[in-house]
Each structure stands twice: as structure tokens, then as C-alpha cells.
Amino acid sequence: MNKSMNFNYEQWIEKISKDLPEDYQIGLHQVGVFGTEESKKAVRRNNPITYLRKIKPKDYCESIMKTGLKNRWNNILYTLAAFGSVDKIRNNIIRQQEFLNYQYDAENLDENKNLELYDVIVATPRQISIGRNTYLLGNLSHPGDMEDSRNSVGERIFKNSDIPSEFIYGYICKQNERVEFTPNQQHISLKSELEQEMYFSKLIREKGISPIELEDKEIDNEKNGTRGPIDALKDMQTAEQKEILSLLQEKEDLTAKGMIPYRKFNFLERHLTKRKQYKEYITDRESALNANKENQKRVQEINKLLLAKGNPSITNIKQRIDDISKAKTFEELGIKDSNEAIEILITKGIKFKFESYQQAFELAPEFFGRNPEFMKKAIREDIKFIGYDKTDDEELYREVINLRIKELEVKKEKGDFSEPFEDISVPKELKELYYLKQEIENPKQVEKGKYKIPHKFMFEELRNNISRNELKYWYSQVDGVYDKEFGEELQALYENPDIIVGVHGLDENEYIENKIFTQGLKNSMQNADVTLDRTVAFGKDLAFTSLLNYRIPYNSNETESAIILTLPKKALDKENPVPIWGSHNPQGSDNYVLPQCVYGLYHAKSDGNNRKVIKNPHVKQEEYEYLRYDKKSSKHGTIQIKEEQQK
């Protein structure tokens, strides 16, 4: 348990003022007391675990210091009583009295002033600086302060999330106008500057906090007026290496000093005339011992920080800084994941500019694809950028549809259509887009027992078709058509994270279908390289709406049967692919997708009331020699000969 300290009220205010920077924001959370019916009700209502388990308030405070304070509310002021900055508390006597005499509204303790009151103290900085950027964490504003509500801590950090232990300054027990204070050794103010920066960088990244006045602000480069992401990453990595270099040099200086000596004293000559020299000796010795202790402690801290960096040396750090200055690509900077690198730049508030939206998507498609505001700006420049979207944001797709409709209506007025339509005045794609727009604004109600297709699959279809300039929108034709059981079964397959769903179309033929169930799906391009995409549609080439109604021209006719395959995700793992091909022929010229991968089939010409998946019973399946895989995984389709056949 942490050691506590006793103060009177005046000393307590001095203690806070000395420990915390003046701009730190203070909030109190009263844990509750036992003794009166009012206090028991308050504890029961606000801290039921404390009440039911008969946990002492002091123990509950200790737990909060270790794990953080649970925030169960949308508004942080339901969890904390806010008192503003340390500076305002210190310089305002009325504010001090409110702070020192605070009690939860539900507790009526006027007649029980001798009871112990426990308050957990939250102390956070108002803003922080990392590099050249300043981040506003917000205010725990006293009701008497005029503050912008958008800048409150509750809105920026703690809304709908717990308060981490790093912001718990400690807890106090108030009794008879005295304060017993128990500090939290994990509080952010006790960490080194480097540790604070590392913690705040992580916090900013998790919360998505932007630097002050970041929007539309760029830093000019002397040469061309812009700084690209590579330049920004070089600056960031150089700064990180210089921080490590600074630690190494500090450690070297401290180590070189060795133990600080102190003046010796000859105990054999100790007598009254030497009393002054003896006192000087004691003072010098204590000062030296304390300094040595602090130096050793700092060296240990530096060693701990350097251990996390791989124990670098001054020489290799200087070489690393030199390499960074010459780097021109992500690879030369030692960056494997460009998405993560760009995300770190933005969350740290390091300003830079892309040459184009295309460059942004090429460098960090996952990161920008998850940002709906960035996506909205990108599609206004080129609607085909919707192909990068990962948000499934309804507002974004409403705008996509409106942009595409506007584009087609301009074409319609000019008569600029390269393909024939049933009604040239109202092209089919335009009709379907109006349907999708209506579906977003007022979703269609389907018959009982029918499958309502979730909008995310409509967005998937829009994404694929517009980015590839295709004109078919199956959603408008298949929504609410098929039985619920059929739709939900295929959706469960499609969303299974462990498999890849594929589909192969062919003429309806019961003999061939049964053969596929037992012998596997034959490669339709015989004597060609074994490639999955020659045989089935899968991955990005298979939207969910297409899976529901798979139709392609087959021997001049539309597909009549859809063979469904479920391939293990590791089948496409380049490092350790799972074999899915088999062959009767040792040369691998007669190739089959293994029958174990055939899930079943449905007849594409059946109507909505009758369409169902006929599952593969997986009986009497033939055994094949395994092939390593195909050229998509950088593996050639060679057969693995069994050891006994090689002998």
C-alpha cells in the first residue's frame, strides 16, 4: 500500500501547487463513506460494488490508483467535480474552500462532520506539446469559469472512456480540517519528459486528437513549397534518433564522472577544535552520497529506456541519422507498413502535403480509406477513389450516388453514351442509382420470411462498380427476393474471417454436380498454369450481391448452377500456403480444387421461394497428391511426391 502524508488545509494547497504545473486541471471523485443512512444510500447507488462487498473506501481508492477511474457516463462531469486549474485554485480563496470542503451532493453530513471523506484526485495537463505541435487536451473547468465547451477534457479524452491511472494524482481523506494524502506513483507528472512524450503520443493516437489549428495548414519547403510524407517521416525519425543520442551522451557523462568524492575527516584527531571541520565533513558526505544516488538512479532510468530501443551505441545512432538523411523511400527508412507510418505522422500532428489524393491512397490506402472526411474530399476530385473506401459511411455513399447521378444526367443531356440502352432517355444505370438513393433515404420493407440485404453490401457493390466503371447493380434486383434462410446462410459464409468464398458457374447437370462433390472442381483451363482466378471468382472479384445471384455467360448461355467453394484463408498465405489443389497426374496437368473445399451449390435459375444451398455431404471423396499451390502465392504447381514413392 502507498505511503500517506498528513497536512493541514493550508499545507495541502501548497503541496499541490509545488507538485503540479499551474495549468494542470483538477477534478475530484468522492468514493463515499460509511456511517449515516444518507452516506450508505450514496455508496449503494454510486458505488454498488463498494457497498455490497463491504470494501472500505480506502481500499477502493487504492484500487482506482492502480487501474484507473471507471467513467460510466457520456458527460465526464457526472463522474468528476471540476475545479479548474491548479493556478486558479491556489489564487482564489473561495475556490480553495470549495475544493477542500467538497462533498457529493447526495450525502448530507452536516451533523456528522467527524466522518472520514475520501476523494480521488484527477490531475491532467490542459495542453501538451510534441515536436512543433500543440495538442489541446481540454479543461476540467469550474462552473464559474468561462470556457469553450468543445475544449473540455470530457469531450476530448474521457468521454465514454475510463480515466487511466496516469491521470490519478492520488487520493485524500479529510477529517477535522486535516488532509491525509496518498500519492499515486504512476501519475504522469512523475514520469521523465521522454516517458511523458511516449505516453501522450500513444494517447493522441488512440483518441484521434488533432493538433491546434492543424486544418489546412502546411509547412513550406524551401525548394518546392511543400513537404512530402517521406520528408516528414525523415524529420520524425531523425528527431527520435537524436533523443536516443541525447540519452546516450547523458549516460556517458554521468558514467565518466564516476562517484563524486567528498572530503575525508581524520577521526583520530577529533576534538573540540575540529568540531566545525567535522560538521563540514558530514554535510559534504551527505551531499555527495545524495548526488551519487541520484546519478545512479538516472543511469538506471536511461538503461531501461535504451533497453527498449535495443541498447544502441553512439556510433550506430549517428550512422542511423546519416542513413535517414539520405533515404528516399519507405524501405530505406526501415518502414514496412506505410499505413502505420502515415497514421503516426497525422496523429502526432506532423504537417505535410501529398502531391495528390492518388499518392495518398498509394502510400496509405488502409489509413485514408478509414477516414470518411478524407474520402468525401477525394471522391469530389475523382469519384473512382471510392474504390479505396473502408468506412461504409452512409453519408459518403449518399454523396457518391448523387455525384454519379449528376455525371450520368450530364451525359444524358449530351447523348454521350457509348453503349445502347433500352430507353436512351433514362439509362438503366440511372434508374438503378435512383433506386439505391431511395433505398438509403427510405429502406424498402421486405415480405416476412424474405432476406433484407444489409446496406453495407450495397456500398460494396457501388464501390466495386464505380471504381471499375462497371454498370450493373444487382442490389436493386435481389433485395428482398430470396428466402431469409438462403440469404443468411450465404452472408455467414461471406463474413467468416477464416475462409475465402469462391463461386464457379456451369450448366445445370446433376451428374457433373455430384462429380464435383466427390472429385473436386476441375481446372477449366487444362494444360495451363494452376491459377485460382481461372477457375473461380473470389475476393474482390466477388461482391456479396453477385454471390447471391451468380450469373455469367457460359457456352453462350447464362450460368444455371453456382458451385460454392470455401477456401482456407491460409491458402493465399505466401509464406505458408495451405494446399487446395490435387491432381491424378504426376505432371500436375490434370488439376482439381480439392473436394474438401467444395461447400455446396445452388441453382441460379430457381426463384426466390425455392433457392437454397445444396450442401456437399463430403462422402466418397477421392484422395489426390497435393500441389503446393499456384503462382499467386509465388509457388509453382508441382506435386509433392510422397517419401515412399521417392525411394
Image: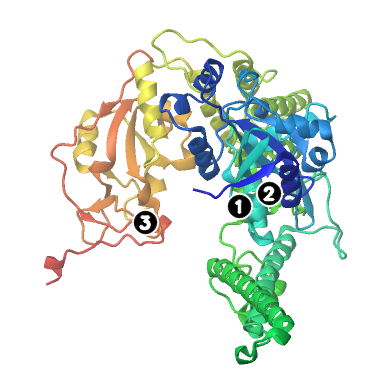
Residue receiving disc 1: 339
Residue nearer the viewer, 459 or 299: 299
> In the rendered view, does 64 fall on the left or right side of 139?
left
The residue located at (35%, 62%) in the rendering is 636
Q: Position of residue 273 (x, y in %)?
A: 73, 86
Q: Amino acid type of disc 1?
A: Asn
In the depicted structure, whether residue 327 falls above or below residue 559: below
Question: In the rendering, at what x and y percent does residue 513 appear?
Answer: 24, 33
- The amino acid on which the numbered mark 3 sits, given as a three-letter code, is Asp
* Image height of 111 relative to 464, above or below: above
Question: Is residue 66 in sight in this rendering?
Answer: yes
Q: Mark 3 — residue?
A: 630
Q: Are circles 1 and 3 on residues that touch, CB within 8 Å?
A: no
Q: Tell me the element at label 3.
A: loop
Q: Residue at x 20, y 33 (%)?
A: 514
Quarter residue 258 falls in: bottom right
Disc 1/disc 3 C-alpha distance (Å): 28 Å
Above or below, 205 relative to 328:
above
Observer able to see residue 371: no
Q: CA distance from mark 2 to mark 3?
A: 40 Å
Mark closest to the chain's N terminus, 2 or 3 = 2
